[in-house]
Amino acid sequence: MIEAVGLTKRYGDKTAVYNLSFQVRPGAVTGFLGPNGSGKSTTMRMILGLDDPTAGQVTIGGHPYRKLPNAPRQVGALLDAKAVHGGRHARNHLLCLAQLSGIPARRVDEVLGVVGLQDVAKRRSKGFSLGMGQRLGIAAALLGDPQVLLFDEPVNGLDPEGILWVRNLMKSLAAEGRTVFVSSHLMSEMALTADHLIVIGRGQLLADMSVRDFISHNSADFARVRTPDTEPQQREKLTASLTEAGGQVLPEQDGALRVMGLPLPRISDLAHDADVRLWELSPHQASLEEAYMRMTQGAVDYRSTVDQRAGFLQELPPGAVPPPQMPVPGQGQPGWYAPPPPQQGGHPFAMPQGQPPAGPYGAPAVPGAGEPNPYAQPSPAPAQPAPAAAPDLTKPEDAR
């Protein structure tokens, strides 16, 4: 089991991870999610002893990684598939790792077969494709037959067959009782692979729960209702009936209605009472991607701007009123939280006000939330005087 308690890491003035606490339990695939720059890689490096935490600690089986006897035989990891000497054959690369850890040479051939690289074992790794490099990195992680495995973007560069293979590999490793910790940005793949999720944003814990609970807590379920397209009055009649019953009705782009606040049997009864025929009545539950986007939309550091030169959007004429901004889904509702931008000067991030719900292990879902924050936001710097105008070298007195 991997356990982090109050994990904090600062690089000079930048706080990469702040007061992060979680557990990764054996027997399940735990997904590690977060936007770019959220601190996932830094956290994994601290788990593996590659970086020392500024505060807090992280242990594997109750011991720091550096104090584990023959750690490569207990913990396997894939952080960077390119961390291979390009001039070595694939088999020789794994053989060197095996000899350093006292692993018999026959295990090298075994893992080459597991990852499907047995036919290219004597090719130099510098000629490998991105997907082949990923397979070689996974082989290195499996070399010591460890009980704890960490993977950072393991399906990067793999084809659909390779992605399916990795998915099944992760599940089989967890089914054997191993601890499997996987970081990925592919939400569709995490939805099919992970049993549990740990989500961070700007170095802080946002969620620690099962995939099902995560989707349920960060999505608004609704029903899709469609009436005959040739009878718009039926649609209007049903809308009035549903609204009167306390439902929230919104039009969809394809002509259907999105109904919230009413269960499907109640919608069906109301349509029957109003003598309205239904062409569609179906439930909708958000995907993991939708729930993730809703949870992390306030913790994204890098956003695209509109490229006016591309011609996709015309610039507004002078004096035109810009269109109103759409409301942020979930903002202001219970459980909605977006961490503020990081502060400078090594200060931790400001925490949300109010006591959050307890996490699955008795700790607050957001460690430190609700406690007094001694680190106030810095006051804006005073305005600097405008720089002096550049000298005009055309004047003789300024040219000296």
Image (cartoon, rainbow, N blue to C red):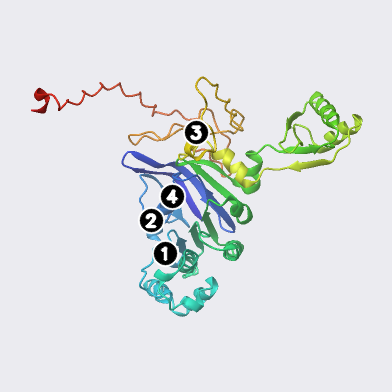
Residue 347 location, x and y as percent? 36, 34
* Marks 4, 3: nearer the viewer: 4
Which residue was labeled with disc 4? 43
Which residue is painted at 79% across and 37% down in the image? 225
Which residue was labeled with disc 3? 369
Q: Which residue is outermost to the front?
A: 394
Q: CA distance from mark 4 to mark 2?
A: 10 Å
| Crowd around label 3: few <14 · some 14–19 · many ≥20 (10 Å) | some
What's the residue type where badge 4 is placed?
Thr
Residue 394 location, x and y as percent? 15, 26
Q: CA distance from mark 2 to mark 3?
A: 27 Å
- The reply to whether the C-beta atoms of the residues labelled 4 and 1 are less than 8 Å apart is no
Which of marks 3 and 2 precedes in the sequence? Answer: 2
What's the residue type where badge 1 is placed?
Ala
| Residue 71, disc | 1
Which of marks 2 and 4 precedes in the sequence? Answer: 4
What's the residue type where badge 2 is placed?
Gly
Where disc 2 sits, the SS reads loop
Which residue is painted at 55% across and 62% down in the image? 178
Q: CA distance from mark 3 to mark 1?
A: 35 Å
- Looking at the image, residue 342 sits to the left or right of residue 287; the answer is left
* Marks 4, 2: nearer the viewer: 4
Q: CA distance from mark 4 to mark 3?
A: 20 Å
Which residue is painted at 39% across and 28% down in the image? 374
Would residue 288 be visible to someone looking at this image? yes
